[in-house]
Every structure is written in structure tokens, then in C-alpha cells.
């Protein structure tokens, strides 16, 4: 639908709108002017008041100085608190690393212990001891000795890096291995790189209560293993007890199995 | 829900396998498959998809280096990250394994957190 009104009406409406906007703007300007005028009056009064009453002025000044100094103290306290928090943060980070390391060590010890008691087969137990010493300790040349109860000598029954026959046998109390087993004390020399077939750097006696079962004698560590760690010492202690128990149990089991088979043979002979 | 990362451990020592499983289980959303020698590893890697493989070098039946060579010879396995975990600490052993296509070379005795951080890096998992 077309607009039939003359164009003059349109122009008048535009003008009216413009005029209304101008009026609103003027009102805003007047209000702003009034606000500024009041602010000037306030400031003038304040100045006059301060000039008339220097004590009040000093009091105000004192209050402001105190406020500034209290804010300064607050800032200082925040800074100190921040330093304390930073320090705590560093301590937590260090503790986290320690716990992480402990966690890793416990995992190694758990795995070693779990594997040692996972079988009653003597050859399997010895194989697991070899695995632990290679993979968890990082030994390159070593032997597992078992006490021969008939001869009372320690004989190498398994080894890594050399044949078992190349490791000397020991009587209880003789040589590093024999002495370690007799005393029950772990022999450990730091710097495990020495390559001396006759002198192990580590000897872990394997004992069940006071009964000697055998020993682990480490002669050389892997190329990348530079020194013993606290975990290695924990592993030596664990092996000393758990490997001994595992060997002892496997031997007992094997003996009892043999006896059971013999008895079963007799029973079969008698009943058939 | 984010997708599961599948990790293959090829290692003949049950002790090491258990230790590696222990370490890697700390990652969220992972599925770990174990293989006890190179041949077993090859069979598993050929029939299934894995996002990462941890391979020992000295193993019976088929050693780790041969397994890496065979894996890298397969077009669909070329991109799979491989971490070698071995007792061999000599520079030439490291270079040989990396030359065959391994992405990382870790020597035993391993630290569980080192394995974890290498696995995270290769699987692109944020801490």
C-alpha cells in the first residue's frame, strides 16, 4: 500500500524526532552539569573545612597514613605467605618424587616376592632368581649357589655370564661366599664393575631361620649399571629371605612328591 | 569417553612382564597384551591393532631385533611406536635397534616411572 500523504509530512516527522532527541540530549547535559556543579561545591566545602580546621585535616592525614601502612603490612604478609606456599609447593614436589620412587621400589619388591613364591619347582625357582638378579638388580655375571647337605659345600647350580662349573665351590666359612653364608651377613662392595671371577662384589646368603640354603654371588654388573641403589639393598634382603624359603619349600615339595610316588607305587603293587 | 590404548609387551621373562604390566596399568584407559617371545609377539601384532609395543631383545624362538625388522617391513605397522627394553647397554646395540625402527631404547634394570613417561610420550597422553 502506497503512502498518499504529501512528502512535507514525512519531513515534519523526521524533524520532530530530531527535535525530541535534541531535547533529551539537552536534559542529559543539564543533569550532568548539575552533578558537576555539586561535586565542585563539595570539594570547595571540603577545602574550606580543611583550611578552617587544621586538626581535622591532620587527623584525616593520619588516618590515611595509617591506612597506607596497614595496606603495606598486609601486602608484606601476602608476600610472605606466598613465599611459604612456594616453599610448601617445592616440598610437596620433592615428596611426590620420593613417594613415586618408593612406589616403584615397592612394585619391584612385590613382583620379586610374587614370582619367587609362584612355583614349587626347584628349577623354576632358580630360573626366577636368575631373572630377578638380571632384570631387577642389573647383574651381568653371577651364580646361584645351593648348599649340598651331604658334602656341606656350596655349589653353583645356575649362573649368568659364565658356566656354573666356572664358579668355585665353597665350604661353609671359607672364601667370601662361604663366610657370608656362615655369618648370614650380606657382603656388598660398592662399584660393581670389577671383573674378578674369584671375588664377588656382592654375596647374598640364603638362609631359612639359621639354616643355610645357598647364596647368590654377583661378580659383575651390567655396563649401564654404575652403582648399587637403595632398592638393590632392599632386593638383596628380600632375596636373602624369600629366595631361601622358595628353594627350601621347592626342595621339601620335591622330596615329599618323591616319597608320595614311592608309597603310591607300593600301594599299587599291593592292591593290584 | 576417550579410546583405549592397546599395548603389547613382548618379553620372555615373566618377572619383567609383570613389572611392565604393573607400571603401564597406571595409565588410564589401557589394555595390555603379553607375548612371551618374538614369534608370539609377531602373531599378536599381525592379528590385532596395537598403539605401542615394548620389545625385549634377547628372547628365545625369535629375538627382538628380528621382530622389529619384520614389523617395520609391514606397511600397516610402520607407524606403531616401538620401545626396546634390554640388558644390552652398548652404544652399537642402541644404534642397531634405533636403526631398525625402534622409537626408544631403555636399558635394564628399568625404572617404572621412566617406562611410564616414555609410554605417555609415544601414546601422546597428557600427564
Image: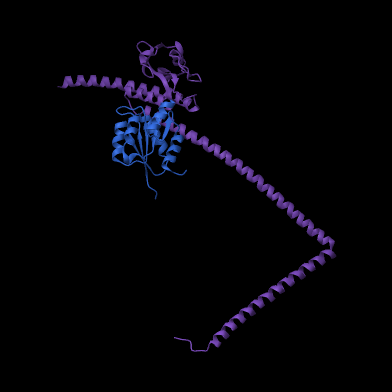
Chain colours: A purple, B blue
- Toward the left, the furthest residue is A272
User: Toward the viewer: B125 or A137?
Assistant: B125
Give the position of the N terminus of chain A as an image quadrant. bottom left
Query: Which quadrant of the structure image shows residue A47?
Result: bottom right
| Left or right placement of residue A94 versus residue A104 in this view | right
Numbered disc total: 0
In percent of width and height, residue B50 lies at 34, 41
- Toward the bottom, the furthest residue is A5
In percent of width and height, residue A136 lies at 42, 27
Query: Which quadrant of the structure image shows residue A123?
Result: top left
In percent of width and height, residue B40 lies at 29, 33
| Left or right placement of residue B12 versus residue B108 in this view | left
Query: Which quadrant of the structure image shows residue A44?
Result: bottom right
In percent of width and height, residue A216 lies at 41, 19
| Looking at the image, residue A22 lies above or below residue B102 | below
Task: Write the residue at 33% across / 33% down.
Answer: B69
Give the position of the C terminus of chain A as an image quadrant. top left
Task: Write the residue at 31% across / 27% down.
Answer: B60
| Looking at the image, residue A4 lies above or below residue B58 | below
User: Toward the viewer: A226 or A179?
Assistant: A226
Task: Write the residue at 30% across / 41% down.
Answer: B48
Amino acid at each position: 500500500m502506497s503512502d498518499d500523504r504529501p512528502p512535507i509530512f514525512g519531513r515534519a516527522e523526521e524533524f520532530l524526532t530530531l527535535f525530541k532527541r535534541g531535547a533529551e540530549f539537552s536534559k542529559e547535559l543539564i543533569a550532568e552539569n548539575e552533578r558537576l556543579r555539586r561535586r565542585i561545591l563539595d570539594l570547595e566545602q571540603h577545602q574550606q573545612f580543611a583550611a578552617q580546621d587544621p586538626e581535622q585535616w591532620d587527623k584525616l592525614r593520619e588516618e590515611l597514613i595509617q591506612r597506607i601502612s596497614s595496606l603495606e603490612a598486609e601486602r608484606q604478609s601476602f608476600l610472605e605467605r606466598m613465599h611459604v606456599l612456594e616453599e610448601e609447593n617445592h616440598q610437596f614436589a620433592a615428596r611426590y618424587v620420593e613417594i613415586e620412587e618408593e612406589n616403584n621400589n615397592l612394585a619391584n619388591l612385590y613382583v620379586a616376592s610374587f614370582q619367587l613364591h609362584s612355583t614349587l619347582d626347584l628349577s623354576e625357582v632358580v630360573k626366577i632368581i636368575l631373572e630377578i638378579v638380571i632384570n631387577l638388580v642389573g647383574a651381568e655375571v653371577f651364580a646361584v649357589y645351593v648348599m649340598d647337605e651331604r658334602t656341606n659345600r656350596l655349589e653353583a647350580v645356575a649362573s649368568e655370564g659364565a658356566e656354573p662349573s666356572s664358579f668355585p665351590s665353597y665350604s661353609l666359612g671359607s672364601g667370601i661366599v662361604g663366610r657370608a653364608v656362615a655369618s648370614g651377613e650380606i657382603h656388598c662392595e660398592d662399584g660393581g664393575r670389577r671383573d674378578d671371577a674369584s671375588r664377588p662384589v656382592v654375596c647374598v646368603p640364603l638362609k631359612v631361620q639359621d639354616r643355610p640354603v645357598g647364596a647368590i654371588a654377583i661378580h659383575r654388573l651390567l655396563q649401564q649399571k654404575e652403582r648399587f641403589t637403595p632398592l638393590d639393598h632392599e632386593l638383596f634382603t628380600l632375596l636373602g629371605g624369600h629366595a631361601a624359603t622358595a628353594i627350601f619349600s621347592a626342595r621339601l615339595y620335591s622330596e615329599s612328591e618323591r616319597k608320595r610316588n614311592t608309597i603310591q607305587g607300593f600301594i599299587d603293587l599291593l592292591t593290584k | 569417553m576417550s579410546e583405549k590404548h592397546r599395548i603389547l609387551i613382548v618379553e620372555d621373562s615373566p618377572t619383567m612382564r609383570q613389572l611392565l604390566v604393573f607400571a603401564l596399568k597406571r595409565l588410564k584407559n589401557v589394555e595390555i597384551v603379553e607375548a612371551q617371545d618374538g614369534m608370539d609377539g609377531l602373531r599378536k601384532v599381525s592379528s590385532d591393532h596395537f598403539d605401542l609395543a615394548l620389545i625385549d631383545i634377547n628372547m628365545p624362538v625369535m629375538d627382538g631385533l628380528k621382530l622389529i625388522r619384520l614389523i617395520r617391513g609391514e606397511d600397516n605397522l610402520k607407524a606403531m611406536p616401538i620401545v626396546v627394553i634390554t640388558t644390552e647397554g652398548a652404544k652399537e646395540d642402541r644404534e642397531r635397534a634405533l636403526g631398525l625402527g625402534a622409537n626408544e631404547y631403555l636399558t635394564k634394570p628399568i625404572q617404572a616411572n621412566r617406562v611410564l613417561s616414555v609410554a605417555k610420550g609415544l601414546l601422546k597422553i597428557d600427564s
